[in-house]
Amino acid sequence: MSDLIAVAFQEQELAFELRAELAKMQKAYLIDIEDIVVATRDEKGKVKLHQAVNLTSAGAVGGGFWGMLIGILFLNPLLGAAIGAGAGALSGRFSDIGINDEFMKGLAQNFKPGCAAVFILVRKVTADKVLEGLSSFRGKGKVLQTSLEKDREDTLREFLEAQAQEGPA
């Protein structure tokens, strides 16, 4: 079962830096992330979700491959690739894996302009090593919501909110 963690920052750059740092840790097998999204709210109040994976592009690539393969069977690989890429892009555009987009947008509507949050869906984590690796974020964020057990959530809150000033939400 995966755990959801939502952390808000007053500066958008910190949210993107956290996502990059967690991606490095995933490559080192310290954390297994199912989905990670940065939600930002600009000065005009518009909320934007920055997905780690572009589903439209992934769908187009996968669809193009399968379309070309099927096209080879029917002696027209280019037409098959084109149709497959179009169908894959369309299905990718309307797919939603991981964290619910409406949930993230609804939460981000309450942010002050210029703020951001990182939404992380975690399968497994080596908590002590991940917190150690995220020491540069100590006191810079605010935990908005988690599905962690109470003691693990409290540890995360103490770490991220230590010496924190007024939160972004």
Image (tube, grey):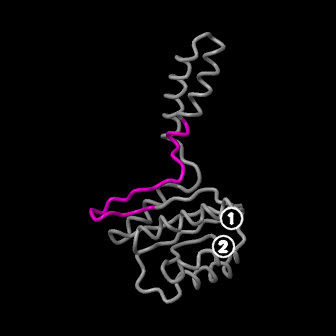
The x and y percentages for residue 112 are 34, 72
Compared across the picture, whether 65 is left or right of 37 comes to: right
* Above-or-below relation of 100 to 136: above
- Element type at mark 1: strand
The x and y percentages for residue 30 are 70, 66
Q: Which mark is residue 31?
A: 1
* Above-or-below relation of 68 to 167: above
User: Residues in magenta?
Assistant: 39-59
Residue closest to the eye, 21 or 169: 21
Residue designated by label 2: 130
Q: Earlier in the sequence, mark 1 or mark 2?
A: 1
Please state which amino acid type lies under the numbered disc 2: Val
Compared across the picture, whether 88 is left or right of 113 comes to: right
Q: Where is residue 105, by image quadrant? A: bottom left
Compared across the picture, whether 112 is left or right of 16 comes to: left
The residue located at (64%, 82%) in the rendering is 155
